[in-house]
Amino acid sequence: MKIWEGMGDRARMITKIIIITLSVYLSFRFVLPLILPFVFSCILAWMVGPIAEFLYRKFKLPRIVGGSVFLFILVIFFSTGLFYLMNILIGQSIKFARNLPAYLTILAGKLDNICSSCDEILGLAAGSVRALLDDNMISMVDRVRSDVIPGVTAQTLNLTIRLVGFIGTLLITFISAALIVKEIPELRKKHKNTDIYKDIKKVTVRLADTGIAYLRSQFMVMVMVAVCCVTGLVLIRNEYALLLGIGIALMDALPFIGSGIVFIPWAIIMLLNGNIYGTAVLITTYLICQIIREVIEPKLIGNRIGIKPLYTLMAMYIGLKLFGLVGFILGPLGLVIIITVLKVVNEKQTISYSLDKGIDLE
């Protein structure tokens, strides 16, 4: 193209990067929310497509029937696993709620001892620190009553509507996946010789490898942290090990929070109570979680998607700033898309330039 002929190599590269990056940002910001159910439909169709094709060739079973049956089996399998997991979590949650008054009584006793010690250390009159703490607690409770509870009540109907909409979106996703499985062979046959199909295929094939590798790596890291947390809590014989372990793992995945917000105060309390074993287990669990999150995660994700760990962390931070918590995934995924599209564009221009100059690429 003539637009590139007047530019140097560096200027062309910078221009390509700017155009591709801006396109990815605008797509994530405005297009992705509209087509997200169909993106998941394509992923599901990609998963069940080979099986539906096998059933069609072997038993002449229509692709839409084979795809629908396998999708139904997947839904049953994951729903069953989720049911048993939620059953355990709900059981532990109910048990925790029943024991909460006893825990609050114990906490109040500990708090009295801490406040008394603070009064002695600071040379204050007995009960000064506790009175200050009670005043702050009363104001916080009043604020919750006046601001938080009315807001939660007002959002109940909105949450119900969103839940119904979410169920409808799931139905659209599964129906679309079954239809895509049916239409893939015809679409491939009709458009496989067009240039745009070839370009899209080059990009999607590479994105399938790198993007799925990234998501798989993120899932593996979260599972590793969750297993570590649950194991640590089981070792100290905590009766809410699964509930707390998964909760701490989810908190650990959030930037600037981490598992230390739970493990460090908990370990200090156990140390003050003279429980050396529990303190050692909690600190060890916290350190292992930190190693997984700070050392293993960047290397695992960076190696899987072919990007240096530093760039992966930078992409996570930028995504977090641009899109919030979901940017923690969209940032590195956007970086993968930018690099992949840039490589495809450069390869296409190299081939076009070589053909124009009569250069043999074989």
Image (cartoon, rainbow, N blue to C red):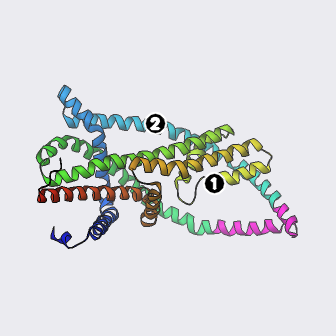
- The stretch of residues the image draws in magenta is 115-142
Q: Is residue 164 left or right of residue 280?
A: left
Magenta stretch: dominant SS? helix
Asked which quadrant contains residue 227, the reply is: top right
The residue at 48%/64% (across/down) is 154
Q: Magenta includes 332?
A: no
Asked which quadrant contains residue 31, the reply is: bottom left
Asked which quadrant contains residue 230, the reply is: top right
Q: Magenta includes 141?
A: yes
Q: State the residue position of label 2.
A: 81
The residue at 42%/64% (across/down) is 323
Q: Residue furthest top?
A: 59
Q: Provide residue 24's location: percent of width, then percent of height.
A: 32, 62
Crowding near the residue tagged with mark 1, few <14, some 14–19, many ≥20 C-alpha atoms within 10 Å: many
Q: State the residue position of label 1.
A: 260
Q: Is residue 218 visible?
A: no
The amino acid pointed to by label 1 is Gly
Q: Is residue 71 visible?
A: yes
Q: Provide residue 150's location: percent of width, then percent of height.
A: 54, 66
Crowding near the residue tagged with mark 2, few <14, some 14–19, many ≥20 C-alpha atoms within 10 Å: few
Q: Is residue 246 above or below residue 63?
A: below
Q: Residue furthest bottom?
A: 6
Kind of element beneath mark 1? helix
Q: Is residue 271 above or below residue 33?
A: above
Kind of element beneath mark 2? helix
